Image (cartoon, rainbow, N blue to C red):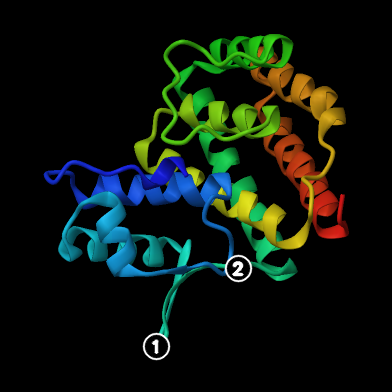
Amino acid sequence: MDFLTPIDLEATSGRIAQRLRAAIASGQLAHGTQLVETELCGMFNVSRGPLREALQRLVQEGLLRSVRNRGIFVESFDLDDVRDIYVTRAALEGAAARIIFRRGDNRRAGDRLLRLVDTGALPDDFVPGIEFPGHDFRFHQLIVHDARSKRLVRIHQTLLIETTMCVETLQATPPDVSHFREAHLAIAEAFRSGAVDSLATMLARHLDETEGLLSSGG
C-alpha cells in the first residue's frame, strides 16, 4: 500500500499525519481499522514520539477514535454524522464564497469553476493537501481554495475526508453524482454574475441533495 512506504527519520509528526489522512481518504485505511503503533513505527521508520503526536492530532480532528484499554481505530460514521457533516460543509463553503465576493474575486472564481466543469482540470496554482477522487469533490475544494484561508482549507479537507469515510461506511459504491453538472454550472455562473444573495442558498441546496443521495443509498 502506498501510504506504508518509509518516512525519513527527520520527518515531522505533521508529515506522518498527512500520510495517514491520505490513506484514510483513499480507503487504504478502512473504517474500523485498528492502528498498531509498533507496526506503523516500523513501516514509517520513525520513533513512537512523532507517531503518537500524529495519531493524537487525527483523534482531535475526528478521523481516529481512541478507545480506552483497546487502542486507536479509524472512525466510523452513521446517518446522523452524515447530516452533521453536510450542514457543516454548507456553512463553511458559504463562508468561503462570502470571502471571495468581499474581496471582489468572484468573477475570477466563477471562471475557474466553469473551466473545471468543462474540462475536469484544476487550475495550475491549485495545490491540494490531498487528491480527492471525483469531480464533485474537486469543485467544492476549488471554492474553498479560492477563499485563500488556510484555516478554512484545513477544516474543509477534514470534512471531505469524513465524506469519503461516510461513503465507505454506508455504501458499497459512491452515489451517482453525474447529474450534478447543472448545479455546478449554476453555482459557477452565480459567482460570475455577482449573485451573492442566492449563492449560499444554492450551495446549501446542492449539498443537501448530495447528503440525501448518500443517506438513501444513492
Q: Quadrant of residue 58?
A: bottom left
Residue 163 drawn at (x, y percent): 63, 51
Position above or below: 83 against 17: below
Instruction: Note whether residue 54 is visible.
Output: no
Image side of residue 29 versus residue 152, left or right: right
Q: How far apart are marks 2 and 1 (CA)?
A: 17 Å
Q: Sequence order check: which comes first, mark 2 or mark 1?
A: 1
Q: Residue at x 28, y 68 (%)?
A: 38
Residue 176 drawn at (x, y percent): 84, 38
Q: Residue at x 42, y 60 (%)?
A: 61
Q: Which of 193 and 7 is in front in this view?
A: 7
Dot 1: what SS? loop
Q: What residue type is labelled 2?
A: Ser
Position above or below: 55 against 159: below
Dot 2: what SS? loop
Crowdedness of circle 2 by 10 Å Cα count: few (<14), some, many (20+)? many
Q: Nearer the viewer, residue 104 or 202?
A: 202
Q: Which residue is drawn at 45% across and 66% down?
A: 64
Q: Nearer the viewer, residue 169 or 208?
A: 169
Labels in figure, total:
2
Position above or below: 121 against 38: above
Q: Residue at x 63, y 49 (%)?
A: 164
Which residue does the numbered mark 2 point to in the structure image?
A: 76
Which residue does the numbered mark 1 point to in the structure image?
A: 68
Image side of residue 215 versus residue 106, left or right: right
Q: What residue type is labelled 1?
A: Arg
**Residue 58 has which mark?**
none
Tell me whether the residue at label 2 lies in contact with that at label 1, contact meaning CB atoms closer than 8 angstroms. Answer: no
Position above or below: 97 against 174: above
